[in-house]
Image (spheres, coloured by chain):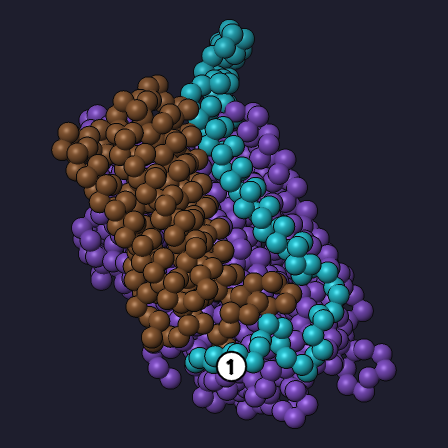
Chain colours: A cyan, B brown, C purple
């Protein structure tokens, strides 16, 4: 019973290590958390730019549409010309 | 077995070489982007972060920036040169400029190391040496690629060399952009 | 057959044999680990006497050796086993064939990627021969431990550097090939799902690995150049203050590492989705339901996988805002996986299922991946992750996905394409023994892990947590896991025997024994060096099975046009 009362008192006695859940350790805006936030923002921005470029390429080339390719099957593969140099 | 061609494929609009170099550059953007992200974390969370001007030589950095800008101009124009000979000339000039960049960098490094400014002294210097060192490594590898493209014309022919010149022009432009970001982050801020 | 070859089929087989050997090595490590957890302090049977005194004096495993085994098991399976098998072996061998192309877009780059992979693996394993042993900081190489660990960690980092170069070379090749070398008529929306899965996987490898390359360079700088990218100020090691500059952050490593390692897990699963889709379409004799949904799901999964990584860092003190953001993105990314599995399940409906050995593996994949995926949800929610992070629950979750998930798909793929590579069939009885032994064995090992994790047992504990009350309460489960590991090992013996025997003595078969529609079956088994006698012309989608009005129950996707009509 005494132990229980002790722990209840400890919990209720204001900010304490007992509230130190590892999501933020009760430090909402410390230097490390701010640093991580900055790093995450930078990396997400860089990634978004690169992925955006990939997405734009896919849209521009309309590769994802199910339209049949303009080259008649049985004709030349797209892009090959008479000036092709073969290498093995 | 894979036919080499500088004609673009009709549905993607690019050649194999162009596709390859853009993909490679995308991965390089992620590499340097991650290092810039590391820079952000370390700088924002640092108690003290020196101003680049106080530690590094802005003059040398600016000289290198100018050298790279001119070099990129030559490398870019080597892509669209009318004939192979003109393209090779321009790439040769670009290569000489890249070597000048490395010389200036080397002078800078020896000055800093001589003054005891080694990577282990501070996180700022660690970041500086890593970023510029990795960048310089890319310049060295680009130079090797330039030599390989310049000397291979007789062996592989004009079509393949044209493809290589196009790829290298893009590569050097990228190297330059990365340098400018490094210059701003490390030297000027 | 030349050893250094630029033929994608040779390179694919090189990847296959090397990755299977590494998988075997990683499995041997787990036998040691499982024994130790079931019988801590007992001498290892049979091979205990062969181990040096530094590792296992008197055959009793030392804690240091245990952590090395754990770290190298994870590293081997992920980086040296599963991904090279899924992408390097299956991807390299099959993609040009499925596209109707004579080879990959950059054959010499392809060869380079294999040799870099082999070199990277050898460099990493050289750590075992260094004083201090192999890397022992987990497959995640977390600082501060990884920064101050013995030389084996440097070997790990150098090996990782080479592996990442290999991976980048391979992914550039894969994307270029898929986009540029498709046969005439093969529009993107006519590609087999396997090809789509390899395309998205290659993009993930291309864009996610470079940050780890950067991080590896930074950690090497910390270890070799005395920098402190990841070492905070004021560290004390074994009672003595660490002599380092300080000012760094271990969280920086986690940030960069998980940026790769989360897309990496999608790299582990996407080729498996591709293989399972091919086998199911073929075994049910009907087209896959929801092709566009699958393609869209994979593309969406690929894009989203780049913005979920910090769900591995919920307990690092990032704060509720960051944790909330990553929790939301993680919940969103669970949707495409569900779409994928659901479309495969719906595809089974109305099918006439042939229960061949590959089909059994593909069918078992579905519920096993389901268990793995669903158990990920409490981990993606920050609140429940507080209790489950770094426990055996996580280990159970990802092993269900990778072992009875991805590895089953890989096994199924090996049985399915074996006739294409060799012109012979595997032995069905040995295949079934392999299947059932593996299924029971894997479930026996991984199912108790959820219970252990919920009880609170941490990962990577040499004694299985027995010093803690949580470990003592579930200690009885370790014994069952040890027997299951032995059963799993025995099942693999059937697999090895099957492969070895069938290569020489398997029943000879025609070019298309499974009566499949995709382009790789339109050429000889095994394919000629240049793959096709002439460029195929593609006229249909990839899964024209049981089309009403046709005499055959399948229609090949393309045909080889005779010379004079081209």
Q: Residue furthest right?
A: C549
Q: Residue at coordinates 66% horizontally, 55% vertically from top-left?
A: A60
Examine the image and state in which quarter residue C200 appears.
Answer: bottom right
SS for callout 1:
helix
Q: Give the chain of mark 1.
A: C
Q: Quadrant of the C terminus of chain C?
A: bottom right
Q: Identify which residue is drawn at 60% across, 35% down.
A: C327
Q: Residue furthest bottom?
A: C564
Give how far across and how far down residue C291 sits, in percent.
Answer: 73, 62
- Closer to the camera in the image, C317 or A65: A65
Q: Considering only vertical position in the picture, is C404 above or below A44?
A: below
Q: Please say whether residue C331 is visible from this viewpoint.
A: yes
The correct choice, above or below, for B157 with respect to B63 in the image is: below
Q: Residue at x 61, y 57 (%)?
A: C368
- The residue nearer to you, when weighing C350 against B138, is B138
Picture coordinates of residue C390, whole percent (x, y): 46, 38
- Report the number of numbered marks: 1
Q: Of residues C486 and C261, which is closer to you in this image?
A: C261
Mark 1: give few (<14), some (14-19) or many (20+) Cα within 10 Å: some
Where in the figure is residue B15, as x and y percent of width and height?
A: 53, 66
Q: Where does the image place residue C559, in percent across and percent down from the top left?
A: 67, 84
Residue drawn 60% across the image and 62% down it: B13
Vertical order, C308 against B160 (above or below): above
Viewer can see residue C402: no
According to the image, label 1 marks what residue?
C421
Question: Horizontal placement of C427 versus C516: left or right?
Answer: left
């Amino acid at each position: 019973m005494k132990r229980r009362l002790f722990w209840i008192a400890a919990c209720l006695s204001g900010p304490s290590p007992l509230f130190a859940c590892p999501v933020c350790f009760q430090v909402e805006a410390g230097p490390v958390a701010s640093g991580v936030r900055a790093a995450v923002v930078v990396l997400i921005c860089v990634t978004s730019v690169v992925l955006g470029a990939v997405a734009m390429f896919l849209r521009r080339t309309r590769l994802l549409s199910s339209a049949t390719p303009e080259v008649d099957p049985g004709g030349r593969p797209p892009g090959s010309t008479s000036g092709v140099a073969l290498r093995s | 077995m894979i036919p080499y061609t500088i004609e673009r494929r009709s549905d993607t609009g690019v050649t194999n070489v162009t596709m390859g170099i853009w993909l490679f550059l995308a991965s390089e953007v992620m590499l340097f982007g991650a290092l810039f992200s590391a820079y952000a974390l370390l700088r924002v969370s640092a108690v003290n972060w020196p101003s680049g001007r106080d530690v590094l030589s802005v003059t040398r950095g600016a000289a290198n920036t100018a050298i790279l800008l001119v070099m990129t101009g030559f490398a870019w124009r080597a892509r669209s040169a009318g004939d192979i000979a003109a393209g090779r000339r321009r790439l040769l000039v670009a290569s000489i400029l890249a070597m000048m960049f490395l010389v200036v960098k080397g002078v800078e490094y020896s000055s800093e190391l001589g003054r005891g400014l080694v990577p282990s002294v501070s996180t700022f210097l660690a970041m500086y040496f890593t970023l510029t060192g990795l960048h310089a490594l890319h310049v060295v590898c680009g130079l090797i690629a330039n030599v390989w493209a310049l000397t291979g014309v007789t062996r592989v022919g004009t079509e393949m060399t044209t493809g290589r010149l196009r790829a290298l022009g893009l590569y050097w432009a990228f190297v330059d952009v990365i340098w400018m970001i490094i210059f701003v982050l490390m030297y000027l801020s | 057959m030349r050893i250094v070859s630029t033929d994608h089929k040779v390179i694919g087989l090189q990847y296959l044999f090397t990755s299977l050997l590494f998988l075997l090595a990683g499995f041997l490590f787990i036998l040691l680990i499982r024994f130790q957890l079931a019988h801590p302090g007992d001498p290892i049977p049979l091979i205990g006497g062969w181990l040096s005194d530094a590792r296992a004096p008197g055959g009793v495993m030392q804690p240091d050796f245990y952590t090395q085994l754990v770290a190298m098991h994870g590293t081997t399976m992920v980086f040296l086993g599963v991904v090279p098998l899924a992408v390097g072996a299956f991807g390299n061998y099959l993609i040009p064939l499925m596209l109707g192309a004579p080879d990959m877009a950059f054959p010499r780059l392809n060869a380079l990627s294999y040799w870099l992979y082999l070199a990277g693996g050898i460099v990493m394993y050289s750590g075992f021969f260094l004083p201090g042993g192999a890397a022992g900081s987990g497959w995640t190489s977390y600082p501060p431990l990884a920064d101050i660990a013995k030389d084996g960690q440097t070997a790990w980092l150098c090996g990782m550097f080479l592996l990442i170069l290999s991976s980048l070379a391979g992914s550039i090749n894969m994307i270029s090939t898929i986009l540029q070398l498709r046969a005439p008529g093969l529009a993107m929306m006519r590609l087999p799902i396997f090809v789509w899965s390899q395309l998205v996987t290659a993009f993930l490898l291309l864009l996610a690995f470079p940050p780890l390359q950067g991080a590896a360079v930074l950690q090497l700088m910390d270890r070799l150049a005395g920098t402190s990218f990841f070492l905070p100020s004021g560290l004390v090691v074994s009672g003595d203050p660490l002599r380092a500059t300080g000012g760094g952050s271990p969280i920086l490593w986690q940030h960069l590492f998980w940026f790769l390692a989360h897309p990496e897990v999608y790299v582990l699963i996407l080729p498996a989705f591709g293989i399972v889709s091919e086998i199911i379409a073929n075994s049910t004799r009907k087209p896959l339901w929801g092709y566009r949904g699958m393609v869209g799901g994979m593309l969406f999964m690929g894009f989203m996988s780049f913005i979920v990584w910090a769900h591995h860092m919920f307990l690092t003190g990032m704060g509720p805002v960051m944790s909330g953001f990553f929790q939301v993105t993680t919940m969103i990314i669970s949707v495409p996986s569900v779409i994928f599995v659901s479309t495969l399940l719906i595809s089974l409906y109305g099918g006439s299922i042939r229960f061949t050995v590959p089909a059994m593996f593909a069918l078992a994949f579905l519920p096993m991946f389901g268990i793995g995926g669903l158990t990920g949800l409490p981990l993606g929610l920050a609140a429940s992750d507080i209790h489950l992070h770094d426990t055996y629950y996580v280990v159970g979750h990802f092993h269900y996905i990778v072992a009875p998930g991805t590895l089953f798909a890989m096994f199924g793929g090996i049985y399915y394409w074996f006739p294409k590579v060799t012109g012979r069939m595997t032995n069905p009885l040995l295949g079934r023994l392999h299947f059932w032994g593996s299924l029971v064995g894997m479930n026996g090992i991984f199912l108790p892990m959820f219970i252990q994790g919920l009880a609170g047992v941490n990962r990577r504990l040499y004694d299985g947590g027995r010093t803690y009350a949580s470990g003592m309460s579930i200690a009885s489960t370790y014994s069952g896991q040890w027997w299951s590991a032995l059963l799993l090992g025995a099942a693999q013996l059937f697999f090895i025997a099957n492969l070895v025997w069938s290569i020489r003595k398997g029943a000879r078969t025609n070019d298309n024994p499974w009566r499949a529609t995709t382009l790789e079956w339109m050429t000889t088994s095994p394919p000629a060096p240049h793959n096709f006698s002439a460029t195929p012309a593609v006229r249909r989608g990839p899964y024209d099975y049981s089309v009403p009005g046709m005499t055959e129950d399948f229609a090949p996707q393309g045909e080889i046009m005779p010379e004079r009509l081209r």
